[in-house]
Amino acid sequence: MTPADLSLTVLRAVRRAVDENALHAPVPARVRVERTRPGGRGDYASAVALQLAGPAALSAREVAEILRERVAGAPGIGRVEITGPGFLNFTLDGSADAYGALMSRVREQGPRYGHGDALAGDLLRFSHASEVRAAVTADAVGRLARAQGARVHIGCDGAPDPDWARLGIVGDGEDPSATEIRPVPAGATAGELLRRLGPDATRWGLLRPAGHDRAPLGDDLLVQGEGNALFLVRYAHSRVHALTRGAELLGFTSASGQEAPGIAGAEADALLALLADHPAALLAAARHRAPDRLARHLEAVARALLDFHDVASPLPVGDEKPSAAHRSRLALAEAAGTVLAGGLSLLGISAPRHL
């Protein structure tokens, strides 16, 4: 990772913190990083947290912590520390080492990659209106919070709809604090949506928009094309399984963990960055009770995976023989497929291997 790469990585972390409302400050045009002085920690340091502390009305160390959460684990970065009043110090990894470490984490944790204990000890109590969108959103928020270690109790301010069970919703507990969710148009009950769209498209149509936005629930949710984000995400996932089956027919498998060499190219870098961001994306969606953030993240992973596949096929083409590069590309594609499957599961949506 070059200083310019590191600067861009930190800038993206700032922009993401602002987008997630974790940081209320103007996004700078660039972030300055400098070589650590003798006796300092890490390879590079940045004072960006001190720069943003005033506009954000936070201490520099609080800003640094917000940014560290979003930078840690990015490809090429081995460790992020906070020193002094709020300096961020970065220890870099070689790109191949960072790639191997990320592949190992995803392979070991599987669909639970990104789950954690950041909310361990928290007891989240909330209730929702007796309305299908509110019920689906509450269920998804509960899944996200539990994946971060929280205990969750969800109640309903009224009689549950029997059709909710077909959407995978299970109420548990009681609570007085309601969540503000814009309801679906009058007459769009769970039963009607299930008959027309089925459970997966219904849940995606209700969860993909932010809670304060209208939920479009047209038949375009069933269209098999790139314009349908649900199809795109599930197609990308099924494409990975097709690649794995193709590799098996050709007599090779993906590289595992540290044996995988790094992959060069802008498309690979973009996909790696999104996979590294996955734990932070899950935590942000849980903390903000915003399943739509996870849905958008999965869309970005799917598009990046398909872009990567178009440029660097994990399978040999023409007279090519399977090589270490193919095994490494396949490992990256399979890691993306794992992230897509795990994310869809947290939204309560199936991830079929065939479409």
Image (cartoon, rainbow, N blue to C red):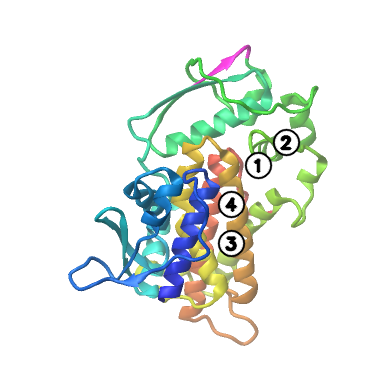
Q: Pointer 4: what residue? A: 298
Q: Is residue 157 magenta?
A: yes
**In the image, which disc is placed on residue 208?**
1
Viewer-closest of 107 and 90: 90
Viewer-closest of 249 and 253: 253
Q: Pointer 2: what residue? A: 215
The answer to whether residue 237 shows anywhere in this view is no
Residue beneath the point at 70% across and 39% down:
205
Q: Nearer the viewer, mark 2 or mark 4?
A: 2
Which of disc 1 and disc 4 is earlier in sequence?
A: 1
Q: Secondary structure at mark 2?
A: loop
Span shown in magenta = 154-159
Q: Mainly helix, strand or loop, the magenta region?
A: strand
Outermost residue on the left side: it is: 39
- Give the spatial CA distance, label 1 vs label 2: 8 Å
- Give the spatial CA distance, label 4 vs label 1: 10 Å
Q: Secondary structure at mark 3?
A: helix
Disc 1 crowd rating (10 Å Cα; few below 14, some 14-19, many 20+) is: many
Where on the picture, by quarter, is residue 307? bottom right
Q: Pointer 3: what residue? A: 240
